[in-house]
Image (tube, rainbow, N blue to C red):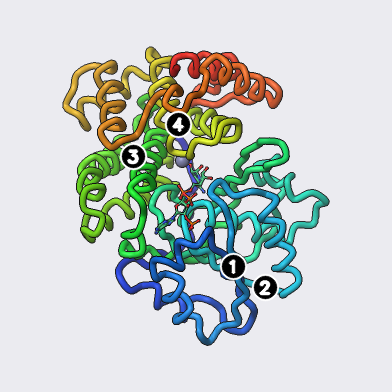
Amino acid sequence: MQNFTYKNPTEILFGKGMIAELSSRVPTKTPVLLLYGGGSIMRNGVYAQVQTALKQHRVVEFGGIEANPLLETCLKAVALVKKEKVKFILAVGGGSVLDAAKFIAAAAVFKGRDPWSILETHGANVAAALPVGTVLTLPATGSEANGNSVISRAATQEKLHFTSALVFPAFSVLDPTSTFSLPRKFVRNGIVDAFAHTMEQYLTFPAAAPLQDRLAESVLQTLVEVAPVTLGKPRNYEARASFMWSATLALNTLLGCGVPQDWATHMIGHELTAFYGPDHAETLAIVMPGVWKYKLAAKRAKLEQYGRRVWGVKTAEAAIARTEQFFLDIGMPTRLSAYSIDAAEAAEKVGARFAARGDAFGEHGDIDAAAAAAILRLRA
Ligand code: NZQ
Ligand code: ZN
């Protein structure tokens, strides 16, 4: 097992009715920014619950955070935060709203000249941030309990992440009933994203970490078990609760303690969203089987373990095929052609970007420009 440090400061408030707890968690003496997306919270009753909980608070609102949040929009919120002297940010929505809140929290007190440099340095230059709390309405990203944020810049078609211990939410409310209104597509996306997060920390090479392996396999098995139930019966509380908690555990940094991590699928996937626009999870379902096929020899031992323990199959090849079938079974395409994306063109564009940045990912640090291009060519 590798050395590691582990600290997760986020308080989780889980279950039906827990939005009411905001009244005691959000500071009352200073202005609070209530940040949200395109309006789903108005239609599903979450906004009304938040308003009731915050009736003693001084609330400033900023709506309109888009999926794959844009720098350009976030900077408007930063201006509002400064103007209104906001001291706390409450994000209410999916991963995009939560990620935007983290960026706004860091950018509002950023001393450098260009806040985009927070993304370019992947958070290395973040020295302070306003505190953030969240009400999560879409289980998927784990943003509710980690220090990651992914922001896009429309002007340059870039999508970059930053990580900072300073932007872990102080608390996150997870009420499964607030997700009942999710369209099927976003539930499917969330299942695949949580599955992929687990895999990025698990599907590498054996590292004498049997507990981490079994924790990861438990999350995978739970997702496989609840996926058809929660897709088929969106208002089944217990299935939705298990899905929601699985998605948090998939990326609250616990699974990655002391083990090698991959993340090549995510990095290639972010470029596909930046260039072509598919949802985050849609890109993962395309890329992940390609990464595994491309790295078959290096990943064979873990693929066999995964296949045996999660699917009851014997070979690495069968484990890959079974995973792809799982995605297809829940309605998630696994090929670039499903989005009319030309594989050769995507390989060239993403490869050129990896080359320009000198990027290389994967547990061996060898998924470079040429490897990323080769992986995409496998996914026509
Ligand atoms: O904007 P509104 O109107 O709220 O609608 C949203 C949005 O259209 C809707 N939605 C959310 N909750 C709902 C709902 N609709 C009905 N009922 C509800 N309860 O869902 C749509 C998608 O929301 P979004 O927040 O974009 O989805 P998701 O949570 O999948 O977040 C995706 C973003 O997170 C980043 C992705 O790259 C992408 O930008 N990620 C963040 C990570 C992190 N912070 O650790 C890790 C991930 O790997 C990922 O990269
Ligand atoms: Zn993801």
Query: In screen coordinates, is 152 left or right of 242?
Result: right
Q: On residue 260, which mark appears?
A: 4
**Cα gap from disc 4 to disc 1, whole angstroms:** 33 Å
Mark 4 belongs to which amino acid? Answer: Pro
Badge 3 element: helix
Mark 3 belongs to which amino acid? Answer: Gln
**Cα gap from disc 3 to disc 4, whole angstroms:** 11 Å
**Does residue 315 lie above or below 175 as drawn?**
above
Answer whether residue 24 is visible to the viewer in this image.
Answer: no
**Residue 102: image location, x then y, percent:** 60, 57
Mark 1 belongs to which amino acid? Answer: Ile
Badge 2 element: loop
**Residue hosting label 3:** 212
Mark found first going from the N terminus, 4 or 2: 2
Pick the residue in front: 233 or 262: 233
Front label number (4 vs 2): 2
Query: In screen coordinates, is 174 left or right of 33?
Result: left
Badge 4 element: loop
- Give residue 308's quadrant in the image: top left
Q: Are marks 3 and 2 in contact (CB under 8 Å)?
A: no
Answer whether residue 311 is visible to the viewer in this image.
Answer: yes
Query: In screen coordinates, is 162 left or right of 54?
Result: right
**Does residue 205 lie above or below 6 as drawn?**
above
Front label number (3 vs 1): 1
**Residue hosting label 1:** 89
Give the quadrant of the N terminus: top left
Mark 2 belongs to which amino acid? Answer: Val
